């Protein structure tokens, strides 16, 4: 029943699939303290079947992210809001409690290499996207340009921009 919701009769919770993208060495400096653990950037998606077409991962350069310890001993990187929600779903060692191992901003993880499930690429990279909202999902967004016109346009714009840093890995 949904009668305790403030609005929207018949509206249930939205269920997402969490996509774990394994961070490849070398880890960025702010995650050096957890380099002995497996670190994942985690993205929430409504369409996990599209991951075959994933080419990169978007993060917002000025957004705050946290690295938290999971019940399995891995480390997830996402927004604090998403981490808090995960803590109430049995994903952290203690229900409703976060063990924050590092605080960072998107710029700290820009250009890192990731091993993503189901994609045909051995390594994908994090790239900047300024339209990511902290209130939705995990703040980490998978990019499937073949299925998302916005992703295609953003990737094309980055390729046409003056090349520097992480963007040079697009070629």
Image (spheres, rainbow, N blue to C red):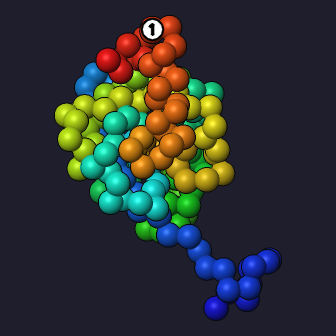
Q: Residues within 10 Å of mark 1 (few under 14, many from 20)?
A: few
Question: Is 85 or 154 nearer to us in this picture?
Answer: 154
Q: Quadrant of the N terminus?
A: bottom right
Q: How many marks?
A: 1
Dot 1 falls on a residue whose secondary structure is loop
Q: Is residue 114 above or below residue 9?
A: above
Give x and y (percent) for residue 60: 57, 32
Does residue 35 show up? no
Give x and y (percent) for residue 121: 22, 36
Give x and y (percent) for residue 148: 47, 46
Determine the residue positioned at 30% across, 57% down. 72
Horizontal side, residue 156 vs residue 10: left or right: left
Q: Is residue 46 above or below residue 155?
A: below
Horizontal side, residue 136 vs residue 20: left or right: right
Determine the residue positioned at 35% across, 54% down. 50
Determine the residue positioned at 64% across, 44% down. 133
Q: Quadrant of the C terminus?
A: top left
Determine the residue positioned at 50% across, 69% down. 15
Q: Which residue is mark 1?
A: 164
Q: Residue furthest right?
A: 6
Horizontal side, residue 133 vs residue 91: left or right: right
Question: Is 26 or 13 nearer to us in this picture?
Answer: 13
Question: Is 157 or 43 nearer to us in this picture?
Answer: 157
Give x and y (percent) for residue 116: 28, 43
Does residue 52 show up? yes
Q: Is residue 135 above or below residue 61?
A: below
């Amino acid at each position: 029943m949904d009668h305790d919701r403030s609005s929207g009769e018949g509206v249930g919770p939205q269920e997402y699939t969490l996509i774990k993208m394994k961070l490849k060495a070398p880890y960025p400096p702010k995650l050096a303290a957890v380099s002995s653990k497996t670190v994942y950037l985690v993205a929430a998606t409504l369409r996990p079947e599209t991951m075959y077409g994933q080419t990169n991962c978007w993060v917002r350069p000025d957004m705050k992210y946290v690295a938290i310890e999971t019940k399995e001993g891995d480390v997830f990187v996402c927004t604090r809001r998403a981490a808090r929600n995960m803590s109430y779903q049995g994903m952290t060692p203690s229900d409703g409690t976060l063990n924050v191992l590092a605080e960072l901003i998107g710029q700290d993880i820009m250009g890192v290499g990731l091993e993503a499930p189901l994609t045909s690429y051995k390594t994908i990279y994090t790239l900047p996207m300024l339209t990511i909202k902290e209130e939705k999902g995990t703040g980490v967004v998978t990019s499937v340009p073949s299925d998302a016109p916005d992703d295609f346009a953003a990737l094309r714009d980055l390729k046409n921009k003056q090349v520097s840093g992480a963007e040079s890995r697009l070629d």
